[in-house]
Amino acid sequence: MSVRRALLLFGLAPLLMAQSQPRLVPDISARSIEIRYSFTGAQLLLFGAILYPGGRVPSRPADVIVVLKGPVQPILLREKQKIAGIWMNADSNRFSSAPSFYAVASSEPVRNLVDERTAAIYELGLQDLQLSTGGGALPEKERRFEAGLLDLRKREGLFAEYPTGVEISEGVLYRARISIPSQVPVGTYTAETFLVADGKVIAAATREIEIGKSGFERFIALAATRHSFLYGLAAVILSLGLGWAAAMAFRRRS
């Protein structure tokens, strides 16, 4: 074999290896979701196909895990306790970055598909989210507040797990439905699809989804962001006006 041919084969080796691995072709039912005053939530369909080398589906097809993440944001979580018969803020903890929304769906429970290390690397589950705390707190306190944040977000519908939420047909076509609650934060969301076989992630693909406000809600949101002083002043004036109108109406009735 000549040196030139050897170099050519060496250069093509990565491509040949890539062709020997299955690929994901993902898609989503909506690339953007608009939030209006009548928005009560939505069902997002994440679907796609698994392309195996040569079109041959193995005797044991791979599994699929889908993760939908919202934009990260800082969070200040307060802990309330009943002191002298009154509920008060007793403690607090700050998270420098945490996803505003998180949902994971899989063809089988995640722990049946990958080990703890792989789940932690790819954040495949609520218990494997990398929540960045502000630092300085004791480990016991951090764990307590992390558990509190997860519980709060689950009750709000912003964090969810679907252990058997991915359906795979003929070992090739997959689909998963994820619920979007009415109070979902706006921003750019990332839909990640992972192909798993023998406890390893063998392929991955990403798509983005925009969730934003439209109509009057968009006008209010932009006004609050771009003209915060005027927005606050208008809110105070509106509150005073409503209070005065209510007082006048009550005086007339009396």
Image (tube, rainbow, N blue to C red):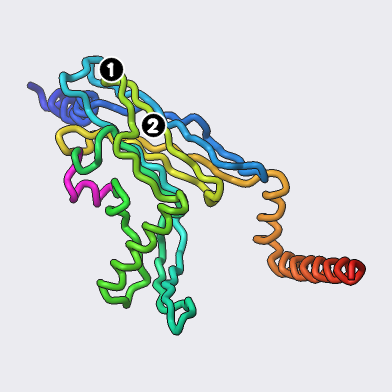
- In the figure, residue 245 lies in which quadrant? bottom right
Crowding at mark 1 (Cα within 10 Å: few <14, some 14-19, many 20+): few
The magenta segment is: 113-122
Residue at 42% x, 79% y: name it. 90
Q: Residue 114 vs residue 28: left or right? A: left
Percent across and percent down for residue 49 are: 34, 23
Determine the residue located farthest toward the left in the rendered image.
Answer: 1
Nearer to the camera, 231 or 147: 147
Q: Where is residue 54 in the image (x, y as percent from the top left)?
A: 23, 15
Going by the numbered disc 1, the residue's amino acid type is Glu
Q: Are marks 1 and 2 in contact (CB under 8 Å)?
A: no
State left or right for residue 116 relative to residue 152. Answer: left
Which part of the image, by quadrant, shows the N terminus? top left
Residue at mark 2: 176
Q: In which quarter of the image is the C terminus?
A: bottom right
Where does the image place residue 103, in percent across and percent down from the top left? 39, 44
In this rendering, would 231 be left or right of 164? right
In front: 5, or 116?
116
Element at label 1: loop
Residue underneath mark 1: 170
Query: At 16% from the left edge and 19% from the top edge, which residue is drawn?
Result: 59
Q: Which residue is drawn at 43% across and 68% down?
A: 77
